[in-house]
Amino acid sequence: MAEPILTSANFPQAERLRSQRLAGGVLTVVADVGGLNEAGRAAFERDLRSAALAHPEVRDVRVAMTAAKSGPLLVAVGSGKGGVGKSTVAANLAVALARSGLKVGMIDADIYGPSQPTLLGAPRRPEAIDKVLQPVATPFGVSLLSLGQLVPAGQALAWRGPMASGALTQLTEGNWADRDLVVVDLPPGTGDVQLSLIQKSRPAGAVIVSTPQDLSLIDAERAVDLFRRTDVPILGLIENMSGYQCPSCGTVSDPFGQGGAEAGAARMHIPFLGRLPLSASLREASDAGSPPAAGDGPAAEAFAAIAAAARAQLEKIRG
Ligand code: ADP
């Protein structure tokens, strides 16, 4: 068989090519453009044509673009370790993105502690139609599929790798057809379970949540490394529990130091998306299934700004 005309050596996006055939100087290419928007597709086609036409045997190019197998546009939220507020931030990020006008879904893939049904007030078991899970509507415009909806409350989830990834596939292959974007709340940490979930679901971008302390930042660095190794573009870092907000006067003080995550993001060459203070009202509202991002006030504004920054990064990389 003849060598393919386009390879990763002369066309960096060669992994999107499904077939290529040269006949009479005309190269016919079938490419999967799933996940790219209109501008991204135009850029892809332009680059493909110029790479192909640079080949001495190619005088014309025909491109057929498909996106048949592309699933929803996923944005993963990860953290280097548990307890940094990843799930809380993921829930509020999803709500803030929905408030910004997108149709948003949430996949709760946190196999160790699926808390999205509580955070988003949607504990109901999803229906399956023709074996396809139907995301459960929440009061906040975000529809949800969670491992927590699939097992009885209180039952410990100690899924092993293959089982976890099988369950996650059911969630990612749910009926997300009407959603513009789906947030994925990953399990905390950077082990094999996370690696295979990322490889399987292939998110379009990733957000990392960290607290300002050095120790958490070292873990955040591992999360950055995990996404880099799996070729998932990093949209940026969110600093949570950044300073302490006094419940009576609202003043933010700094028992743990603030700005550590922002400096860390700069060092790791990833965007900094914003910070949220440690706040009792944020925790109470979250535990009560009433995400602060859905209300008014400083927390809602902070989440709206973070969502806008994440969205801008996503548009930039997909552009
Ligand atoms: P993770 O997903 O990283 O394990 P969670 O989102 O479950 O973390 O949060 C752990 C606990 O910390 C929860 O009780 C949550 O309400 C609380 N929490 C998260 N972020 C904040 C914050 N900014 N202020 C106060 N409490 C928070």
Image (cartoon, rainbow, N blue to C red):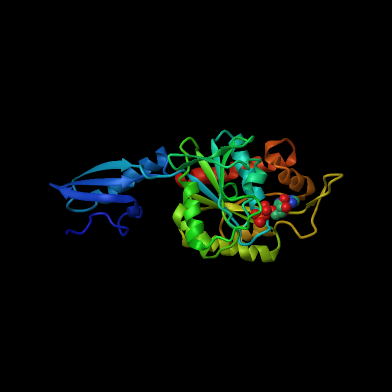
Give the side of residue 98 with respect to residue 231, left or right.
Answer: right
* Residue 246, above or below 300: below
Report the residue that reaches farthest toward the right.
248
Report the residue that reaches farthest toward the left.
24
Q: For the N terminus, which image quadrant?
A: bottom left
Residue 207 image point, x, y percent = 57, 52
* Residue 96, above or below 77: above
Give the side of residue 29 with respect to residue 297, left or right.
Answer: left
Name the residue at 68% across, 66% down: 215
Residue 45 image point, x, y percent = 32, 43
Residue 229 appears in the picture as rendered: yes
Q: Nearer the viewer, residue 103 or 241?
A: 103
* Residue 26, above or below 221: above
Q: Nearer the viewer, residue 174 or 199?
A: 174
Name the residue at 53% across, 48% down: 75
Query: How many numbered marks does the figure carry?
Result: 0
Residue 78 image point, x, y percent = 58, 55
Name the residue at 56% across, 48% down: 150
Name the residue at 31% across, 60% down: 9
Q: For the C terminus, which image quadrant?
A: top left
Residue 274 appears in the picture as rendered: no
Residue 291 image point, x, y percent = 69, 41
